[in-house]
Image: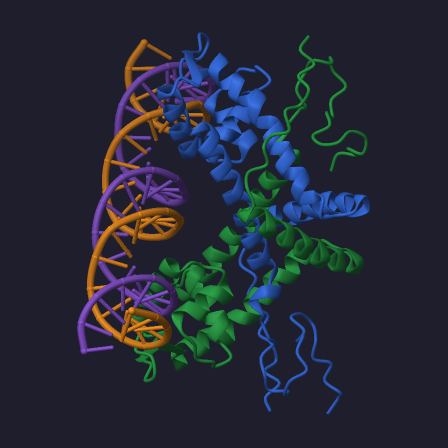
Chain colours: A green, B blue, C orange, D purple
Amino acid sequence: MPPARRSRKASATSTSSPAELPALHLTRFLPYRLSVLANTVSHTLAKLYEKRFGITIPEWRIIAILGSGETMSAGEIAQRTAMDKVQVSRAISRMLESALILRESGDTDRRKALLTLTPKALAIYAEIVPMALTYQEEVTDALSIDERGQLDTLLSKLQARADQLVTRPAPVAVQTEQAEG
Amino acid sequence: MPPARRSRKASATSTSSPAELPALHLTRFLPYRLSVLANTVSHTLAKLYEKRFGITIPEWRIIAILGSGETMSAGEIAQRTAMDKVQVSRAISRMLESALILRESGDTDRRKALLTLTPKALAIYAEIVPMALTYQEEVTDALSIDERGQLDTLLSKLQARADQLVTRPAPVAVQTEQAEG
DNA sequence: CCATTTTAGTTTCGTTTGAAACTGTTGCAA
DNA sequence: TTGCAACAGTTTCAAACGAAACTAAAATGG
């Protein structure tokens, strides 16, 4: 991160001529770094899941949520997995076909279908969880114990802030005083 | 029977019954958290770029890389943006249509096309960079100065490790000694 | 040289995605 | 009641994606 203390916002990191724009190096740009990292990690895991169990990441997430044997509706799954309802709906129909999930119409509210994992899916869960945790540990092995705590804190804070900024109106690019050379 | 020091890897985080699997709470699972965070951030930015300039994230990345006026080939762009060549190729053709980029055949090697931003794209660059930096700072404002340094370190270490693990054979799920009730 | 392999980039094809439209159900209110 | 808004979930459609096949241009090497 740039030491960036001084000015208000968007302080230049370069030491070049005055009229120049603040430099943007993609490899130091947080959204880019997050995107690449998340992508690398997800992709690695996705290949693992796919190769071993023939499931996709959305399906894995659903299995992870329902793995304790709980029953819930598609909407609730969507909330808890941070996927949107379309994604959940599609994952569920795949899982119905491959007999990983059981759907029964709710009795009080026929809009909500109650979803439960089948034994087949629970077996996958039992096998996949250690794999997933192992992978996670292999990644975090790169960090000291302290750093793992820091990571947890940082991710939480960043997510909270990012969530705030989603709704909020666009950050109207501060009109940097165009030194205007 | 020795006091079975269970651990090795994938130590359980829960305090529940012995036979139980190590718990996996999606919201504490690193790949999930990274994915959600990166998604939130990227999505917010993408909407910004799209609304304001009608460009996508791949296009933005190319603009970011070429923004200093440099000229380079598609392959080089792919490397520097961590996008694959297909993605780059498609982004470039869009940018050719919208007159954001200039392509001229290389003279020494006619396979490599030299790509340069047009003034139109440079104007976008000048406007978009402050916006991007502002957004980045709005996000990192959630962190103390110390934490920003930590974030930088952590992301670098994690990315390096994740990269190592991409190539490497699958983490063969450690066969947890099924503590077995 | 000509044949083969490698490299740069594009195209194709099947899949995935997300937004918006749609279907069916429930809750609410006149 | 019936009429309408809100809700749960699905379908549709167009864009985006990735892997693999393809085209064209160097580089290699017999």
The quarter of the rendered structure image containing the C terminus of chain A is top right
B175 to the left or right of A8: left
**Compared with residue A98, is residue A47 higher up or lower down, i.e. above or below?**
above
- Is residue A22 visible from the viewing direction of this image? yes
Image quadrant of residue A122? bottom left
A128 with respect to C2 (left or right): right
Vertical placement of residue A168 versus A63, above or below: above
Query: Is the residue C14 above or below the residue B94 in the image?
Result: below
Asked whether residue A141 appears in the rendered view, the answer is no
Number of labels in the image equals: 0
Point out residue A22 in the picture as x, y percentages from the top left corner: 68, 23
What residue appears at the point 60 percent right and 51 percent down from the top-left corner?
A164
Front-most of residues B164 and D9:
D9
x%, y% of residue B65? 56, 25
Residue occupying the point 47% across, 15% down: B120
At 40% across and 17% down in the image, what residue appears? B99
Residue nearer the viewer, B71 or A66: A66
Instruction: Locate the N terminus of chain A by quadrant.
Output: top right
Against A125, is B153 above or below?
A: above
Front one among B165 and B73: B73
Residue sitting at x 49%, y 12%: B119
* Residue B51 in the image, given as x and y percentages of width and height: 45, 34
Image coordinates of residue A71 in percent, x first then y, are 43, 80
- Is D16 on the left-hand or right-hand side of A145? left
Residue A26 is drawn in which quadrant?
top right
